[in-house]
Every structure is written in structure tokens, then in C-alpha cells.
Image (cartoon, rainbow, N blue to C red):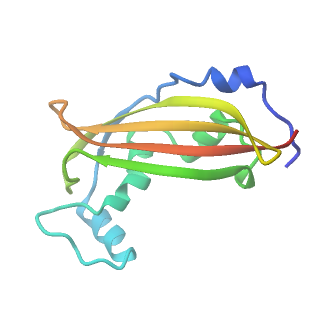
Amino acid sequence: MTGIQPPVEEIRALVGHRFPGGNYTIAHWENFLLTECTGADPLPDNLAHPVALFHMPILGAKTSIGEMFKLGQAEGIAGIGIESYEWDFFQPLREEIPYRVDGEIVSADRMQEDGRTFDRIQFRFDLSLDGGDPVARTTVTWRYRRGAR
């Protein structure tokens, strides 16, 4: 890492940035593979494995991990640290149901910890059914390392 830091105003200005949003359907084959790679047995009644919330919201909101890196002005893959993934379920996830996915940046600020500087950015993705009923929310918090200062 070079330690070059984007202006803190640019980072703070990310709050409120909305992703285009869209729809995502967890296909049966996708759920089967996700479930199998966790070592779990298939769930009954077309229930989808919750691990889908790692990628589904990002793709459904019509963004990408690369775009999330770019927005925070990451200095490469080594410049990102995952602080947390929080999942709230209001209903079970199911296969073959189209979900509406909307996403935005809800928090962005420069932080100092143990003499290190980083930008802490939180992305929130909301999943809902066609009628607007909430299904799940995921809040992803990343640290964009900026080096010591």
C-alpha cells in the first residue's frame, strides 16, 4: 500500500449513494451448490441457504465487488478488510422467487485505530417481495486501509 488517502470529504460524500437496484432469483441449481459447499443437507420446502446473502444482494442491486472497491478508492485487494456482515431475516429465503434488491451506502467515515488509518464504509442491501414485503436486510461493513498517519 502506498498510503495515499483520498480526501475524507470524498469518502463522507458516499453516504446516500444508491445502487441501480434490480431483481434476483435464487435458482434451484445455485441453492443446491451453495448448500453442498457448506456441507449442509438440502433444506425442505424450497428454502434457500442463507449463505446466498453473501453474493445475492450485490448482484441483485446491480453492482459488483469491483464497483464497491472503486467507490471506496481501494488500493487493491490487500487494501480491504472485512469488518462485518450482518443479516436480518424477516422471512425465509426461497428458491425460484424473484426478490427486489435495493442497496445504498449508509455510512462512510475516516477512522483511526492503533495508529492506523482506514475508511469504514457500510453498504446496506434490502430484499423484498414483489408487493414490497421485506424479506431480508444485509449490512456489509468494509475497512479501506489507508496506512499509518
Residue 138 seen: yes
x then y, percent, for residue 21: 38, 32
**Residue at (66%, 35%) from the top-left corner?**
72
x then y, percent, for residue 29: 28, 66
x then y, percent, for residue 20: 43, 28
Quadrant position of the C terminus in the picture: top right
Left or right: residue 133 compared with residue 13: left
* Residue, far left: 45
Residue 62 seen: no
**Residue at (55%, 30%) from the top-left corner?**
107
**Residue at (34%, 34%) from the top-left corner?**
22
Left or right: residue 111 compared with residue 93: right
Residue 62, quarter of picture: top left
x then y, percent, for residue 47: 19, 61
**Is residue 148 depicted above or below 33 in this figure?**
above
Q: Nearer the viewer, residue 126 or 87?
A: 87
